Image (tube, rainbow, N blue to C red):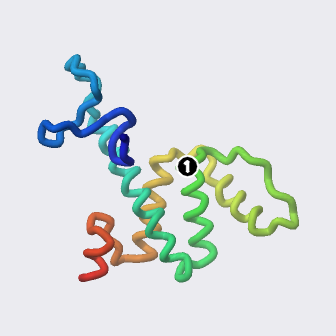
Amino acid sequence: MATPFLPAGATTGDSGGELSSGDDSGDMESFQTPEAEGTRSLAELFEKAAAHVQGLVQVASREQLLYLYARYKQVKVGNCNTPKPNFFDFEGKQKWEAWKALGDSSPSQAMQEYIAAVKKLDPGWNPQVPALLAFLS
C-alpha cells in the first residue's frame, strides 16, 4: 500500500526500511536527483503550510486569504483556466482576479510565496516540529 510519503508502487521492505519498487534490476534512474528531492521537500512544506492555514483563517485579512488562495490554485491547478465569474458573484470574481493575476507563475514560485505568507501570518510556525510538540512547548 502506498503512503503519501512513498511513490505509488514503492514499499518499505524488511531490509532496514530501504525503499523497494519491486524491481531489483539495479536501475540507477530510480534515484531522485537533488532538484527532484528539493521539489518534493518544497511540496511537503507547502502541504504542511496549507494544513496550518486552516487554523489561521480567523486572524488573516481578506487580502491575505486572497493572496493564499491564488497561490494555492496556481500550485494545484496551474494557470487560471476558468471563465471570469459574473458581476454579481463578488467573492468568486475576487478569487478569480487574484488567481488570474499570477499569470504564468510556476508552481514552485507559488509554493515558496505561499509558505512565506504563512510564516508571516504565524511567525512561530515551525513546520519541522510536529504539531503536538509545538503545542507542548
| Numbered disc 1: secondary structure | helix
Q: Amino acid at mark 1?
A: Lys
Residue at left offset 34%, top offset 47%: 5
Quadrant occupied by the C terminus: bottom left
Question: Is 103 above or below relative to 35?
Answer: below
* Residue bearing the label numbered 1: 76
Label 1, residues with CA under 10 Å away: few <14, some 14-19, many ≥20? few
Q: Position of residue 6 (x, y in %)?
A: 33, 42
Where 4 sits versus 13, above or below? below
Q: Could you tell me which residue is drawn at 28 percent across and 34 percent down? A: 32
Q: Give the residue displayed 30% in from the left and 41% down from the top.
A: 37
Q: Nearer the viewer, residue 93 or 32?
A: 32
Residue 15 in percent (x, y) is at 13, 36
* Residue 122 position within the rendered picture, expressed as x and y whole percent measured from the top left: 41, 77
Which quadrant: the N terminus? Answer: top left
Residue 18's quadrant in the figure?
top left
From the top left corner, tell me how far across and down residue 130 is, in percent. 29, 68
Q: Closest to the observer: 90 or 19? A: 19
Left or right: 18 as drawn, with respect to 49: left
Total tally of numbered discs in the picture:
1
Of all residues, the one furthest to the top in this rendering is: 25
Q: Residue at x 35, y 73 (%)?
A: 125
Q: Is residue 107 above or below residue 66?
A: above
Q: In the picture provided, is 24 more to the left or to the right than 118?
A: left
